[in-house]
């Protein structure tokens, strides 16, 4: 194996677990996440010589993942999902630890528009700063702030009232 | 609902995700598939033509230095070097020639399709003219803008037709295909064709900003990280050479290397302009100055750092045209506007080891004619 490929393989082995989890949060589906990750890593491999600063590889591959996930082509290929104002119905999974709040939050996350969801995942899972998130998504810091604010507001609005911590606090 | 709730739930959902580990072979195999899809359908036919052109050393190219050794990365497509139009003859990189009945003073620019046809943009008549490989005129198309834009692999030529639509001539195809035209900068002025990705994807704009991708199905807005104009596309299609506004202190704007995949500007250089990729995509040529009178020529690496350069002494010696001969050499048409002498030389990546291709000779005033026009 060449030095270049060994270098890439080391990165692949070290980071693919974490990247898969990010891909899952972006897509909400394990199979789609695995596909997204493989495609993104393949594109990273093609561009490996261009990413001279090894410290920026994570940021580079995150950009690929987000763009790939947002792309029209993939949206056409995937089953037709569209954002909705309504939390999906069904039998909510009531986790013992939080009386179902987590499941409700997750259901709401899955209704966010793709780009807003990417902002949320990068800010709250990847723990990127607003500036770093803006850089990955190719948008302004102001847009990150407004998207984050809207996403939080949407979450508050759409979470069933009886699971909203604020509401429950008032009941007590 | 607090941010902490959010963070906790995302982490909890993510923590239970475990996939089968991806192997290096699986990723590389996928990469090869992506690379194949990116290439145009005619890539196979082109490769044969290009390979032949590269392997035959000629007076114009002197062969191609491909001393790369084993290369683990997917093969980088190498595209043809420049052809030269001089005295009514087009000399291609493989040394073959095509007689074309035109005066260089009447030529705006030209390209050579991989099927051998020569596509020339003319001033008078205001047309794009297509010559067959034997020099006979095949067709003539009235235009709104007499500029031909070639794809990186020379399989497609495009221009703005008389009807303001994007005209596309594909190598091996007899008939034009037309698509939506570029956006007008105002009035009846036509917009610009900035780059041809392939026969089905043409980047267009208003001469200052590349803003749309024109496809047979229609236009699609192009979103970039900042306003920019694409000036060239790398042979593999992965990178764009671009120009952007460098602010009031920058006369010619700034040049950049842009990754459309991630919408990221990878490198910037405000001392460079009119970037064109080398046939292997590993270097770029920058020309600064007025058209036909460039005072500076620079060869840059992919960080847009200078590798070699030419600067006029200010005594009349300037570059009329320059273009890549092959992956490691640049063809330079030199002229001296004080005595209208001309020569054609070939220089290395360091803008060194000049090799005279056509010795100095008298010619026309460089303000009115380019004695050597190099293909786009």
Image (spheres, rainbow, N blue to C red):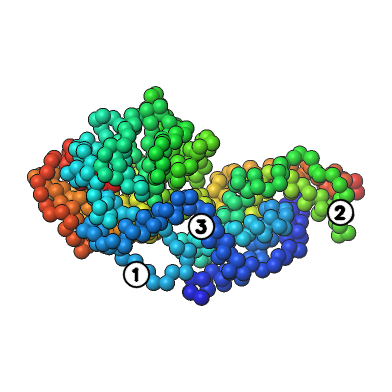
**How far apart are the alpha carbons under marks 3 and 1?**
23 Å
Picture residue at 72% right of the left edge, 41% below the top:
A83
Residue B274 in sight from this viewpoint: no
Residues B290 and B66: in front is B66
**How far apart are the alpha carbons under marks 3 and 2?**
43 Å
Residue receiving disc 1: B67
Residues B79 and A157: in front is B79
Residue B182 percent location from the top left of the image: 44, 33
Q: Is the same chain shared between marks 3 and 2? A: no
Q: Is residue B127 left or right of residue A108?
A: left
| Chain letter behind tag 2 | A
Picture residue at 72% right of the left edge, 58% below the top:
A30
Residue A126 percent location from the top left of the image: 65, 58
Element marked by disc 3 = helix
Disc 2 crowd rating (10 Å Cα; few below 14, some 14-19, many 20+) is few
**How far apart are the alpha carbons under marks 2 and 1?**
62 Å
Residue A26 in sight from this viewpoint: yes
Element marked by disc 2 = loop
Picture residue at 60% right of the left edge, 58% below the top:
A39
Mark number displayed over residue B35: 3
Residue receiving disc 2: A93
Q: Tell me which corner region of the image, top left, top right, bottom left or bottom right, holds residue B144.
A: top left
- Whether the residues at callouts 3 and 2 have beta carbons within 8 Å, the answer is no
Q: Is the same chain shared between marks 2 and 1? A: no
| Chain letter behind tag 1 | B
């Amino acid at each position: 194996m060449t030095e270049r490929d060994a270098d890439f393989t080391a990165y692949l082995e070290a980071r693919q677990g974490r990247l898969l989890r990010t891909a899952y949060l972006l897509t909400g589906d394990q199979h789609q996440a695995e596909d997204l990750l493989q495609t993104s890593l393949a594109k990273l491999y093609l561009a490996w010589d261009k990413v001279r600063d090894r410290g920026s590889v994570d940021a580079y591959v995150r950009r690929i993942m987000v763009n790939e996930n947002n792309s029209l082509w993939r949206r056409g290929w995937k089953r037709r999902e569209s954002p909705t104002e309504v939390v999906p119905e069904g039998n909510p999974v009531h986790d013992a630890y939080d009386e179902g709040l987590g499941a409700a939050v997750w259901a709401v996350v899955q209704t966010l528009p793709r780009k807003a969801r990417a902002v949320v995942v990068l800010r709250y899972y990847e723990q990127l700063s607003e500036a770093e998130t803006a850089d990955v998504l190719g948008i302004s810091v102001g847009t990150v702030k407004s998207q984050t604010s809207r996403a939080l507001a949407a979450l508050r609005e759409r979470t069933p009232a009886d699971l909203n911590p604020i509401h429950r606090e008032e009941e007590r | 609902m607090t941010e902490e709730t959010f963070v906790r739930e995302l982490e909890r959902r993510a923590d239970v995700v475990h996939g089968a580990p991806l192997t290096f072979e699986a990723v590389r195999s996928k990469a090869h598939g992506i690379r194949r899809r990116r290439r145009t359908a005619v890539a196979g036919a082109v490769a044969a033509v290009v390979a032949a052109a590269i392997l035959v050393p000629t007076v114009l190219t002197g062969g191609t230095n491909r001393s790369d050794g084993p290369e683990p990365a997917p093969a980088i497509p190498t595209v043809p070097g420049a052809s030269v139009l001089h005295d009514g003859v087009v000399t291609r990189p493989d040394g073959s020639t095509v007689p074309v009945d035109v005066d260089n003073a009447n030529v705006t620019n030209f390209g050579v399709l991989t099927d051998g046809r020569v596509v020339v943009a003319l001033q008078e008549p205001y047309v794009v003219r297509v010559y067959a490989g034997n020099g006979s005129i095949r067709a003539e198309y009235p235009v709104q803008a007499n500029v031909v834009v070639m794809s990186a692999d020379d399989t497609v030529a495009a221009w703005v037709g008389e009807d303001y639509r994007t005209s596309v001539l594909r190598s091996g195809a007899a008939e034009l295909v037309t698509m939506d035209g570029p956006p007008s900068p105002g009035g009846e002025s036509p917009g610009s064709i900035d780059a041809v990705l392939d026969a089905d994807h043409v980047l267009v704009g208003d001469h200052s900003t590349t803003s749309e991708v024109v496809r047979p199905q229609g236009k699609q807005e192009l979103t970039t990280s900042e306003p920019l104009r694409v000036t060239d596309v790398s042979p593999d299609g992965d990178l764009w050479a671009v120009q952007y506004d460098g602010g009031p202190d920058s006369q010619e704007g700034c040049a950049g290397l842009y990754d459309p995949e991630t919408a990221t500007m990878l490198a910037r250089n405000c001392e460079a302009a009119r970037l064109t990729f080398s046939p292997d995509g590993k270097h770029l040529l920058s020309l600064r100055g007025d058209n036909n009178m460039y005072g500076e020529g620079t060869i840059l690496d992919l960080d847009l750092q200078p590798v070699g350069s030419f600067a006029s002494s200010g005594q009349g010696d300037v570059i009329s045209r320059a273009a890549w001969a092959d992956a490691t050499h640049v063809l330079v048409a030199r002229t001296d506007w004080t005595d209208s002498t001309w020569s054609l030389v070939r220089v290395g990546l360091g803008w060194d080891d000049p090799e005279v291709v056509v010795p100095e000779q008298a010619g026309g005033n460089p303000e009115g004619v380019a004695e050597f026009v190099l293909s786009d």
